[in-house]
Image: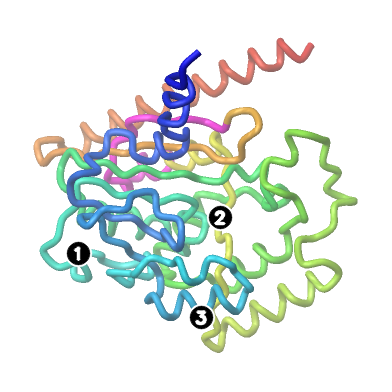
Amino acid sequence: MDGSAGLMKANVMPRRDFYLTLGADVAGDGLELGAANNPIVRSPRCRYADYADTETLRQRFAASDYHGVNSIVAVDYVWAGSGPLAPIVGDQRFDYVIASHVIEHVPNPIGWFRGIAEVVRPGGVFNLAIPDQRFTFDIACPPSSLGELIEADLLGYSRPSPRQIFDSCYYGKAVDPGEPWGRNIDLASTPSFSGEITSQLAYDQAVRSLSGEYYDSHCWAFTPRTFLLLLRGLCDLRLFDFMLKDFHPTIEGEFEFFLSLEKPGPDVGREDLRAQQMDRIAFFLLAIDERDRKLRLLAE
């Protein structure tokens, strides 16, 4: 037996890299958000944006004893994720945008999507990986609501709010990514992520944030279904400027789901876009329901 089979296996792109580059011309102009030390694309034509500059990120990661500090990519654009992005990148426009485990940290996702839509060329893609709260330390967090998204946009959040900071700390559980697949998690007996000091720590951080201290928090908690329902609400309100191309819910053993968005061309009117958005979301919701139905039948 020769080594060709092993070579083929080694050349297979990991699932998450495949979905995060789905439909993207990675030889073109790209923008990756929140890449830290683990970018999906390394290319001279890929730029990197984050909420702080490179040195500030390294200092904050070092303070949290993060071991990848020296590998953090150089940040080309500093953007808080709320407000226009076009003035920050200038005339640069992108063929694709990638955000892996970023949206849950973004204080204002509506403003974030709006800003990204400004700088993507028509037909360009925006691919995301999003943690599924059912299989992470966010397992006990209250599901994010449409009203909270609207509030964050109307108030122009550019940094985590006291409530977002408090909830992220207070509800976090000592659960490893994917752990709930292997055992039943009793939330009542599962320790908090920050231990016995959680309540006071959550409150103190929320208070200190009012004086300008920044706390990188999970501002939002999603499952594939709740995310699609929130997206449907935004589309119904005409607050979302992308088409949903593909949606890949969490699979057994993993803790994240993926979606691929496309910037429509100028010939697509607002009402046509809304109709297409609602049809695609309905399609993916039905697919999730059908998959869950089959899983329930298998479990009986």
Question: x, y percentage for residue 212?
Answer: 52, 86
Residue 12 belongs to magenta span: no
- Picture quarter containing residue 236? top left
Instruction: Label 3: state its secondary structure.
Output: helix
Circles 3 and 1: CB atoms closer than 8 Å: no
* Marks 3/1: CA–CA distance: 27 Å
Q: Which residues are magenta?
A: 232-250
Question: x, y percentage for residue 231?
Answer: 43, 41
243 sits to left or right of 180: left
Q: Nearer the viewer, mark 2 or mark 3?
A: 3
191 sits to left or right of 82: right
Tell me which residue sits at (47%, 72%) in the image: 159
Identify the amino acid type marked 3: Gln
Of pointers 3 and 1, the one earlier in the residue sequence: 3
Q: Residues within 10 Å of mark 3 (few under 14, many from 20)?
A: few
Question: x, y percentage for residue 188?
Answer: 87, 50
Q: Which residue is mark 3?
A: 59
Q: Residues within 10 Å of mark 1 (few under 14, many from 20)?
A: some
Q: Which residue is mark 1?
A: 86
Eyeballing the image, is 170 above or below 123?
Answer: below
Near-viewer residue (288 or 41): 41
- Picture quarter containing residue 161? bottom right
Of pointers 1 and 2, the one earlier in the residue sequence: 1
Q: Residues within 10 Å of mark 2 (few under 14, many from 20)?
A: many
Residue extending farthest to the right is 189
Identify the amino acid type marked 2: Trp
- Picture quarter containing residue 21? top left
Question: x, y percentage for residue 144?
Answer: 57, 51
Q: Which residue is mark 2?
A: 220
Identify the amino acid type marked 1: Ala
